[in-house]
Amino acid sequence: MYRRTLLAALGAAALLTFGEARAQAALDEVMAKKLITIAIPTDFPPYGFVGTDLKPQGLDIDMANLIAAKLGVKVELVPVTSANRIPYLQTKKADLVISTLGKNPEREKVIDFTAAYSPFFQAVFAAKGVAIKGAADLAGKSVGVTRGAIEDMELSKIVPASADVKRFEDNNATVSAFVSGQVQAIATGASVAGNMMARNPQLGTEFKFVLKDSPNFIGVAKGEDKLRLKVNEIIASAKASGEIDKMAVKWLGRPAGELPN
């Protein structure tokens, strides 16, 4: 009886060890294949979109390329949507997801996260010639915002009484009002602003100040700690060298600043 119990215990331990080894296999497989598959967005500028050369570009694509370069492997970019990006990790169609992924308790139950690699924010934008550094500078100025959006709620908390806040029913109407000169400033999300600035470079629009920060994290399959920790090393090094800030300035018009680990 004792022998059977001992053999069962040893068998269970072996299976557990085997399971842990399999769960930790992603980084070893990447290094063996010299290839990492990374899920990215292609419909969410400035984080990920298709350029005029029909190739993916944006902050998330730059981050994917940086990680591959630091690992010394090639990268395969796999376009995903908001709906399928997490299932791609769970079904091993991707080793990492770099796709404006926010961290919350529900997602943490099914995938793991690295340290944050970029900001995602709602902010106020205006032409370079318009002097705005903070909420107080909106006094006497007109600001367009989408009714009921996060940026509307955040703006309402701090906007001076003398500011002329014009609320529109959707992002397209808000952007159109700014582009056509109906308002001097626009309060919107980084993605909407990035797309607007890319389409209308003649406006000379720039980031003015943040309304709300919601940083992005890289998704890793549950239990793949070796890969997660290796990516964390790369992120930490890129933060220290200024590469993270350079990417944020390039695509978002502002440094990444302090990001959570």
Image (spheres, rainbow, N blue to C red):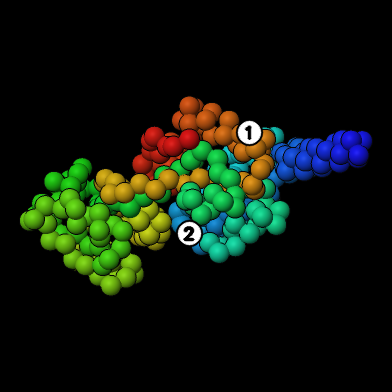
Judged from the image, the secondary structure of the residue bearing numbered disc 2 is: strand
Q: Estimate the x, y position of residue 253 in percent, counting from the top left.
A: 36, 45
The image quarter containing residue 87 is bottom right
Judged from the image, the secondary structure of the residue bearing numbered disc 1 is: helix
Q: Residue at x 16, y 62 (%)?
A: 165
Neighbour tally class for label 2: few under 14, some 14-19, many 20 plus, Cα within 10 Å: many
**In screen coordinates, is 213 left or right of 134?**
right
Residue designated by label 2: 44
Q: Residue at x 70, y 57 (%)?
A: 91
Q: Estimate the x, y position of residue 198 in percent, counting from the top left.
A: 40, 57
Compared to residue 26, the image places residue 190 above or below, namely: below
Q: Estimate the x, y position of residue 22 in percent, counting from the top left.
A: 77, 43
Res 184 seen here = no
Res 165 seen here = yes
First reached walking from the N terminus: tag 2 or tag 1: 2
Residue designated by label 1: 230
The image quarter containing residue 93 is bottom right
